[in-house]
């Protein structure tokens, strides 16, 4: 009788461990997604800044 209880206990512990690992991976994925979005927004702002400043700069073609 003790063996089935021990198996049940081990499975419960493993299930909790897997749930925690899944939550940690999800959190990491969310963080990576936010970082990628922030990087893309910064790059878009940099490009817009460059375009705006080029439009305002006098260009002399020789």
Image: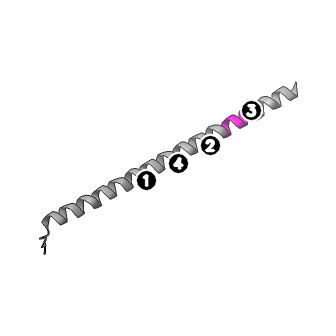
How far apart are the two marked residues, 2 and 4, measured between alpha carbons? 10 Å
Q: Write down the residue under mark 3.
A: 11
Residue range in magenta is 10-17
Which residue is drawn at the image coordinates 66% and 37% (left, top)? 16
Which quadrant of the view contains residue 51?
A: bottom left
SS assignment at label 2? helix
Q: Residues within 10 Å of mark 4 (few under 14, many from 20)?
A: few
Disc nearer the start of the sequence (3/2): 3
**Whole-Å distance between the Cαs marked 3 and 4?**
25 Å
Dominant SS of magenta comes to helix
The residue identified by callout 2 is 21
The tag earlier along the polypeptide, 1 or 3, is: 3
Disc 3 secondary structure class = helix
Measured as percent of width and height from the top left, residue 41 is found at 33, 54
- Front label number (1 vs 2): 1
The residue beneath circle 1 is: 35
């Amino acid at each position: 009788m003790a063996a089935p209880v021990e198996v049940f206990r081990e499975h419960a512990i493993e299930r909790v461990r897997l749930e925690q690992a899944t939550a940690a991976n999800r959190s990491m994925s969310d963080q990576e997604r936010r970082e990628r979005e922030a990087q893309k927004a910064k790059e878009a702002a940099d490009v817009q800044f460059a375009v705006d400043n080029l439009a305002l700069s006098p260009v002399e073609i020789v």
